[in-house]
Image: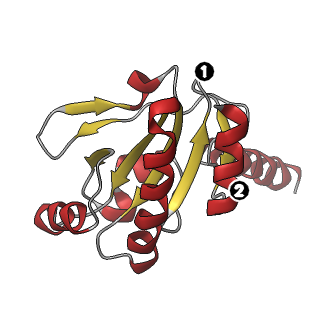
Amino acid sequence: MIKLFKSFLVLSVFLVITQISNAQPKQGKDAFEIALPSLSGDTLKLSSLKGKVVLLDFWASWCGPCRSANKDIGKLYSKFKDKGFEVFSVSLDDNISAWEKAVKKDKITWQQVNENGGWSAATARQWYIEALPTTFLIDKDGKLLAMDLSEKQLEKALKDLL
């Protein structure tokens, strides 16, 4: 009986540690690095944006709410990009052509990268993405400030930070 209890305890601790390690990054912690190909095929790194306030945006061309959010992000990007704001969007599209068409149709001018594989993509798993769109606001030092802010909340945060 004691041996069974010890085995159960070890398994429970293992499961808790696994869940903690798989959780989304926490407020105040460093953002996980992302290095993925852009539309032109160049590798873009999230860390290259240190010194700017960054909105990390996970989306896909087939996601209706993502496409709507692109319009709102575009307004804020135009308003704050010259003040030190950048957007780094990660597409989880498997269909590269659909991603390219969505970027053109939505008139996206900020940084775009893709990692096909959808929910199983390594970056989606690392950031523990369970829904699209999902956004993270990252400060100039690369620390996570907030997640999934509304357009009004994001605008206020940008005014305060920039």
Label 2 environment density (alpha carbons within 10 Å; few <14, some 14–19, many ≥20): few
Q: Are marks 2 and 1 in contact (CB under 8 Å)?
A: no
How busy is the neighbourhood of tag 1: few (under 14 within 10 Å), some, or many (20 plus)? Answer: some
Nearer mark to the viewer, of 2 and 1: 2
Give the label on residue 141, or none: 1
Q: Residue furthest right?
A: 2
Q: In the image shown, does 126 or 41 lie closer to the viewer?
A: 41
**Does residue 70 lie above or below 42 as drawn?**
below
Q: Which mark is residue 111?
A: none
Does residue 14 appear in this view?
no
Residue 106, position as x, y percentages in the image: 28, 66
Which residue appears at 68% of the width and 60% of the height?
Answer: 152
Residue 78 location in percent, x, y? Answer: 43, 48
Image-based side of 138 in relation to 81, left or right: right
Q: Quadrant of the N terminus?
A: bottom right
Residue pointed to by mark 2: 153
Task: Tell me: residue 137, above or below residue 95.
Answer: above
Q: Amino acid at mark 1?
A: Asp
Figure coloring: secondary structure
At 51% from the left and 41% from the top, the residue drawn is: 80
Residue at the limit of the structure toward the bottom, as seen here: 64
Give the structural element (helix, strand or loop) at label 1: loop
User: Where does the image place residue 60, in percent across and percent down from the top left?
Assistant: 33, 66
First-in-chain label (2 vs 1) = 1
Is 18 placed left or right of 75 in the picture? right
Say which amino acid is labelled 2.
Gln
Residue 53 lies left or right of residue 114; in this view the side is right
Q: Is residue 26 above or below residue 133?
A: above
Give the distance between the C-alpha atoms of the residues marked 2 and 1, in whole angstroms. Answer: 20 Å
